[in-house]
Each structure stands twice: as C-alpha cells, then as structure tokens.
Image (cartoon, helix red, strand yellow):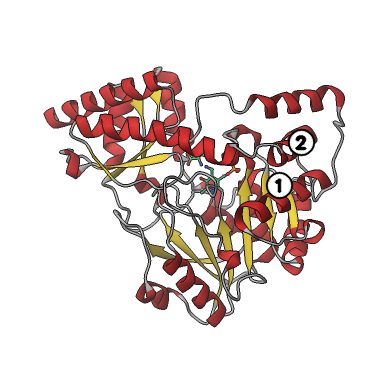
Amino acid sequence: MANRIFSTLPNSIFEEMSGLAMSLGAINLGQGYPDDPGPEAIRAKAADAVLNGNNQYPRTSGLSELREAVANHYRRTQNLDLDWTTEVTITSGATEALAAAFFGLIEPGDEVIVFQPLYDSYLPQIRRAGGVARLVTLQPPHWRFDRAMLEAAFTERTRFVVLNNPINPAGIVLPHEDLALLAEFCVAHDVIAICDEVWEQVVFGNSQHRPLIAYPGMRERCVKIGSAGKMFGLTGWKIGFLCAAPALTKAMSSAHQFLTFTTAPNLQTAVAWGLENSPDWWSAMPRALERSRDRLVDGLRREGFSVLSCQGTYFINVDLPASGISEGDRDFCLRAVKEAGVAAVPVSAFYEQDPVSTIMRLCFPKRDEILDAGIERLAKARELSRKG
Ligand code: PMP
Ligand code: GLN
C-alpha cells in the first residue's frame, strides 16, 4: 500500500496548469519560468564543462568552487559571513534543500509553523518527516503577519518556523519590522527558522530583501536556502544552496547525502562561474523583469482588471472580484485555459485550510507579444465568465 501523505495528494498545480496549457496549445502564464533561454555566457560554461570537464560524481557537499562562490556572493550582496567549508551545501534545487532541512532536523511530533500561502512541497515533506504543521494564514492585499498571529501560533512544542521571503505567490518582500518580530519569537521560543529565500535576487524598485539569518540571535538558528534557478532565470537547472551554522549543516548535509548524494557537476561549475562573473546581472535582471511586470500590469489595468502590488518574484496577482469576476479562482483559471487559451494559477492552491479563492497569479517574464496576447485572452475569459 502507498502511504497516506503522498498517495492522496493531487497533481501539483504547476503540473496541472502547464499540462493543460501544453495539450490545449494555450499561452502559459501559470508555472513560474522565464521564456528567454538564460544568460548565454553561463550556458556556454555549462556546455564546455559537459564536453571538457568532469562528469563523474562530485563530492556530496558540492564542488568547492561553487560553495566558495556562494559564500562570496552572499558576502557581497547581503553582507553575510558564511564559512563555505562548514556552512554551505549544494543541493538539487531548493526543493531538495528544503527536504534535506526537514528530514535532517525535524523529530517526529515537532511542531512546525508554516505561513499560507505556501509553496506546495512544504507540507508533504514536513509531514513525511514527522512534523506537525501549524498554519498561519496571510491575507491579501498585504500578506503580512503581526504579533497576535505569532502569539497564537507559537507553543512550547514549536521547534521550527518555515519562512518564504520574498513570498511566492504573493509577490511581496517582507519589511524589516516583520522580520525583526519573527526573529524575536524564534529567539524567545528557541525555534529554528528554515528560510526559503529563492526569490532574494528578484526584487524590484526600492524593496530590499533582508535575510533572516542576519537578525540578532538568528545566526546559529537559521537555515538559508537559495536557488541558482531563480538567480539566473535557469529554473530547470535545479541547483540549490543550503546555508547554516555547522551543527545544522552537519545534520542537513547528512540527509542530502541520502536523498540525492550530489548534483550535476557541469551545472555547478557554470553557476560558480556565473556568481563570480556577473557583477551587472543583479541590477540588470530585475530591471528587465520590472519592464515585463509593468507591461502586463498596465495592460491588465487598461482592460479593467484590478492588480495587487508586486515587489518581487516572477508573479503578479489579480483580484478577481475587484475585476468584475464572481467565479472562484480555480474555476476562472480552468475557464481561461480551456476557453480563452491562457493558463494562470489559482492562489487557493497555495492554501491547505480556509483558502483565499479570489486571486489569480500570473507569471510575467515573457516576451512582449506573449504578454499582450495573454492580456487579450484574459479579457476574453472575463467576458465569457460574465456571460456564465
Ligand atoms: N520555493 C519557492 C518559494 C519557489 O517558488 C520555488 C520554485 N519556484 C522553489 C522553492 C523551488 O526551487 P527549485 O526549482 O530550485 O527547486
Ligand atoms: N515554483 C514555480 C512556481 O511557483 C514552479 C515550480 C514547479 O513547477 N514545481 O510557479
């Protein structure tokens, strides 16, 4: 017999919507990936490493050159002081880093605080590790938590909190006061924070990503997770970074050892090169994305859609009722892909309890003509929805 946790889960919403988009020939503004091929110089390094480099198992903790490049990158961009020899592990994407954190750290019965909307791999992995999830629900349009919400969630059995910041799908970057508050609770309750910061470089305008590990008392009780897939817009590469103090790293890298053991060496080589040789990328990439974001937001607003503010990630969110759509998010997204030829993601899929079902997420790093056609098709879907 299959186990209860995984056998009863539906397909991931990304798989479902991309599958529909592909089979129906629809424009895909659902799953989060850019439609350009990614930085050519980094892809050329990977190709060269495949042809001329080492193609055998790397060390389980990752190539030294990449671990050092990760520590250097975080020193330059976030002023962090990580010892790459004892505090950085390379994983097969952030998804595997999260699994290694949960399997390496959680003891059966430990309470784990998780904020919804949540990335879909968290709950099944936490539960399979024996954790008991306690959900804190964030609501649009601000998606923030406060002291009363944390007071209600933290108990004497709380051992971990999982924080995604910048938040997918909300598109917000948490401000300093929220992070300081969470750090205060972690220290007071002796809790470890597992921080999914994969969107740390995809931040726009004056918004600033602040890593929780830099807050007072958090250096030894924080796991910081990053992803080269998001940093360089190469989402299929699945190169993740797991950073934490040595005692935490030891437990998590041991779990990583028995999850995947290691990660493709040629892609590691190319990411290491990219981190050390792309000084302009970190401002050019968000600027280019911001242009696409604005094109989609402006076009949707011209059509009468109501769009929430977006400070980071690849995603904007449309408020359906405020856009004159009375259907729930899932029904509207199914109608949009089947009847109007455009795929989106219903935000209710990111909630386990009491879902917010009035918001549709759209992915904007796409060519202008795709965005323009997407706007037209979404307007058509709204017309069809109004006719019922
Ligand atoms: N966490 C969040 C919040 C994400 O949005 C994603 C991917 N979009 C991941 C984790 C997974 O990252 P990776 O592809 O590196 O496994
Ligand atoms: N994280 C990506 C998104 O939010 C999708 C990742 C996946 O397909 N599992 O769209």
Q: Which of 1 and 246 is in front in this view?
A: 246
Q: Where is residue 61 in the image (x, y as percent from the top left)?
A: 80, 51
Q: Mark 1: which secondary structure? A: strand
Left or right of residue 361, residue 282 in this image: right
* Residue 205, position as x, y percentages in the image: 42, 46
**Disc 1 target residue:** 91
- Can you identify the residue that label 2 sits on? 264
Q: Distance between the residues labelled 2 and 1?
A: 10 Å
State the residue at coordinates (57%, 34%).
233
Q: Please provide percent x and percent y for residue 33.
A: 50, 33
* Nearest to N terminus: mark 2 or mark 1: 1
Q: Which of 224 and 299 is in front in this view?
A: 299
Drawn side of residue 368 relative to residue 112, left or right: left
Q: Can residue 63 be seen in this view?
A: no
Instruction: Specify the quadrant that holds the C terminus.
Output: top left
Label 1 crowd bin: few (<14), some (14–19), many (20+), radius 10 Å: many
Q: Can residue 113 be seen in this view?
A: yes
Q: Nearer the viewer, residue 32 or 292?
A: 292
Q: Which amino acid does label 2 sit on?
A: Ala
